[in-house]
Amino acid sequence: MSKLVRNIVFFPLKKYKIGLSLLLFVFFQVAQAQIDNSFDIGVTVGAISIQSDYGERGDIKSNLTGNIGFSTSLVLYKNFYGRRNYWHSRSSWLEEHLKLKAEISYFKADLNHYGVYVESESDAATLLKAMHGTSSVVNFGIMVEHHFLNLSDFSKYRDGHRFSPYFSFGGMVGMSKATVTSDLGDYITNPSLLITPYQNEAIDTEQITVGSTVFGLGTRIKISENSDFVIDTRWQNYFSDKIDGLVPEIEANKYHDWTYSMSLGLVIAL
């Protein structure tokens, strides 16, 4: 593994190792309630789109193609069956369809204004076009994956089905940090470099702790006896409007920030 890849994947993990340790402790405490369970571990990388106060709600570039970032995650799955006993004739619905997933993830996105408000030659458009930001979040959480097909069939590499589509849901706690800059100069000493709604303490770039709900769709693809390729898409709604560092008191700013992501990954059975 190259030095660059190690820095991208593991630097956020080192920075928040206390939270990761707590998450894994809780995860394994839950796992102890089952006898002879098995586990999988995996890594994913992908792209993430953030919907925030940057851009215009309903604008395609603002919502989907403009404010795009990079995401990565380390995941640990708990299966409700044991690999020593493997599958048996009386496998329960829990064993056949559910996985418990603990995850630590990190994303960072560059933020810019898009839409009709920056397409004119007005003074306000000039100020908005000069305004840029970043948002970075480290999330820790636990999710439940419901697989639509029987996992016992999917586990059979040579005789079973190769795809296992799933729906997932869960909750996360994250540490969020945003930055805001202007090409025109220091907006802190000269607030006139910002449009009026972003003046008067409407920018807050302090690190915050924030909760979120997560809903996802994806599939596993069996590539060997003990490894799967994963395609995962998810929608994550944060209980805060400060993920981007902007908190203007205007009518349009009535929704929390949220993200949509698509990731590819590899999962290996332990």
Image (tube, rainbow, N blue to C red):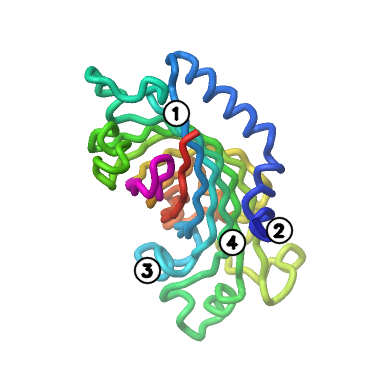
Q: Which residue is mark 3?
A: 59
Left or right: residue 254 versus residue 245 is: left
Image: magenta residue range: 217-229
The structure residue drawn at horizontal position 41% and vertical position 56%, both measured from the top left corner, is 262
Does 99 appear above or below 164?
A: above
Q: CA distance from mark 2 to mark 3?
A: 38 Å
Q: CA distance from mark 1 to mark 3?
A: 40 Å
Give coordinates of residue 115: x percent, y percent: 42, 73
Give coordinates of residue 54: x percent, y percent: 50, 63
Using the image as rendered, state which of residue 62 and residue 193 is in the foreground: 62
Which is more foreground, mark 3 or mark 4?
3
Question: Which amino acid type is marked by label 1?
Answer: Lys
**CA neighbours of label 4 inside 10 A, class few (<14), some (14 to 19), many (20+):** some
State the mark number for residue 78: 1
Which is more foreground, mark 4 or mark 2?
2
- Mark with earlier residue (1, 2): 2
Q: The residue tagged with tag 4: helix, strand or loop?
A: helix
Q: The residue tagged with tag 3: helix, strand or loop?
A: loop
Quadrant in the rendering for residue 87: top left
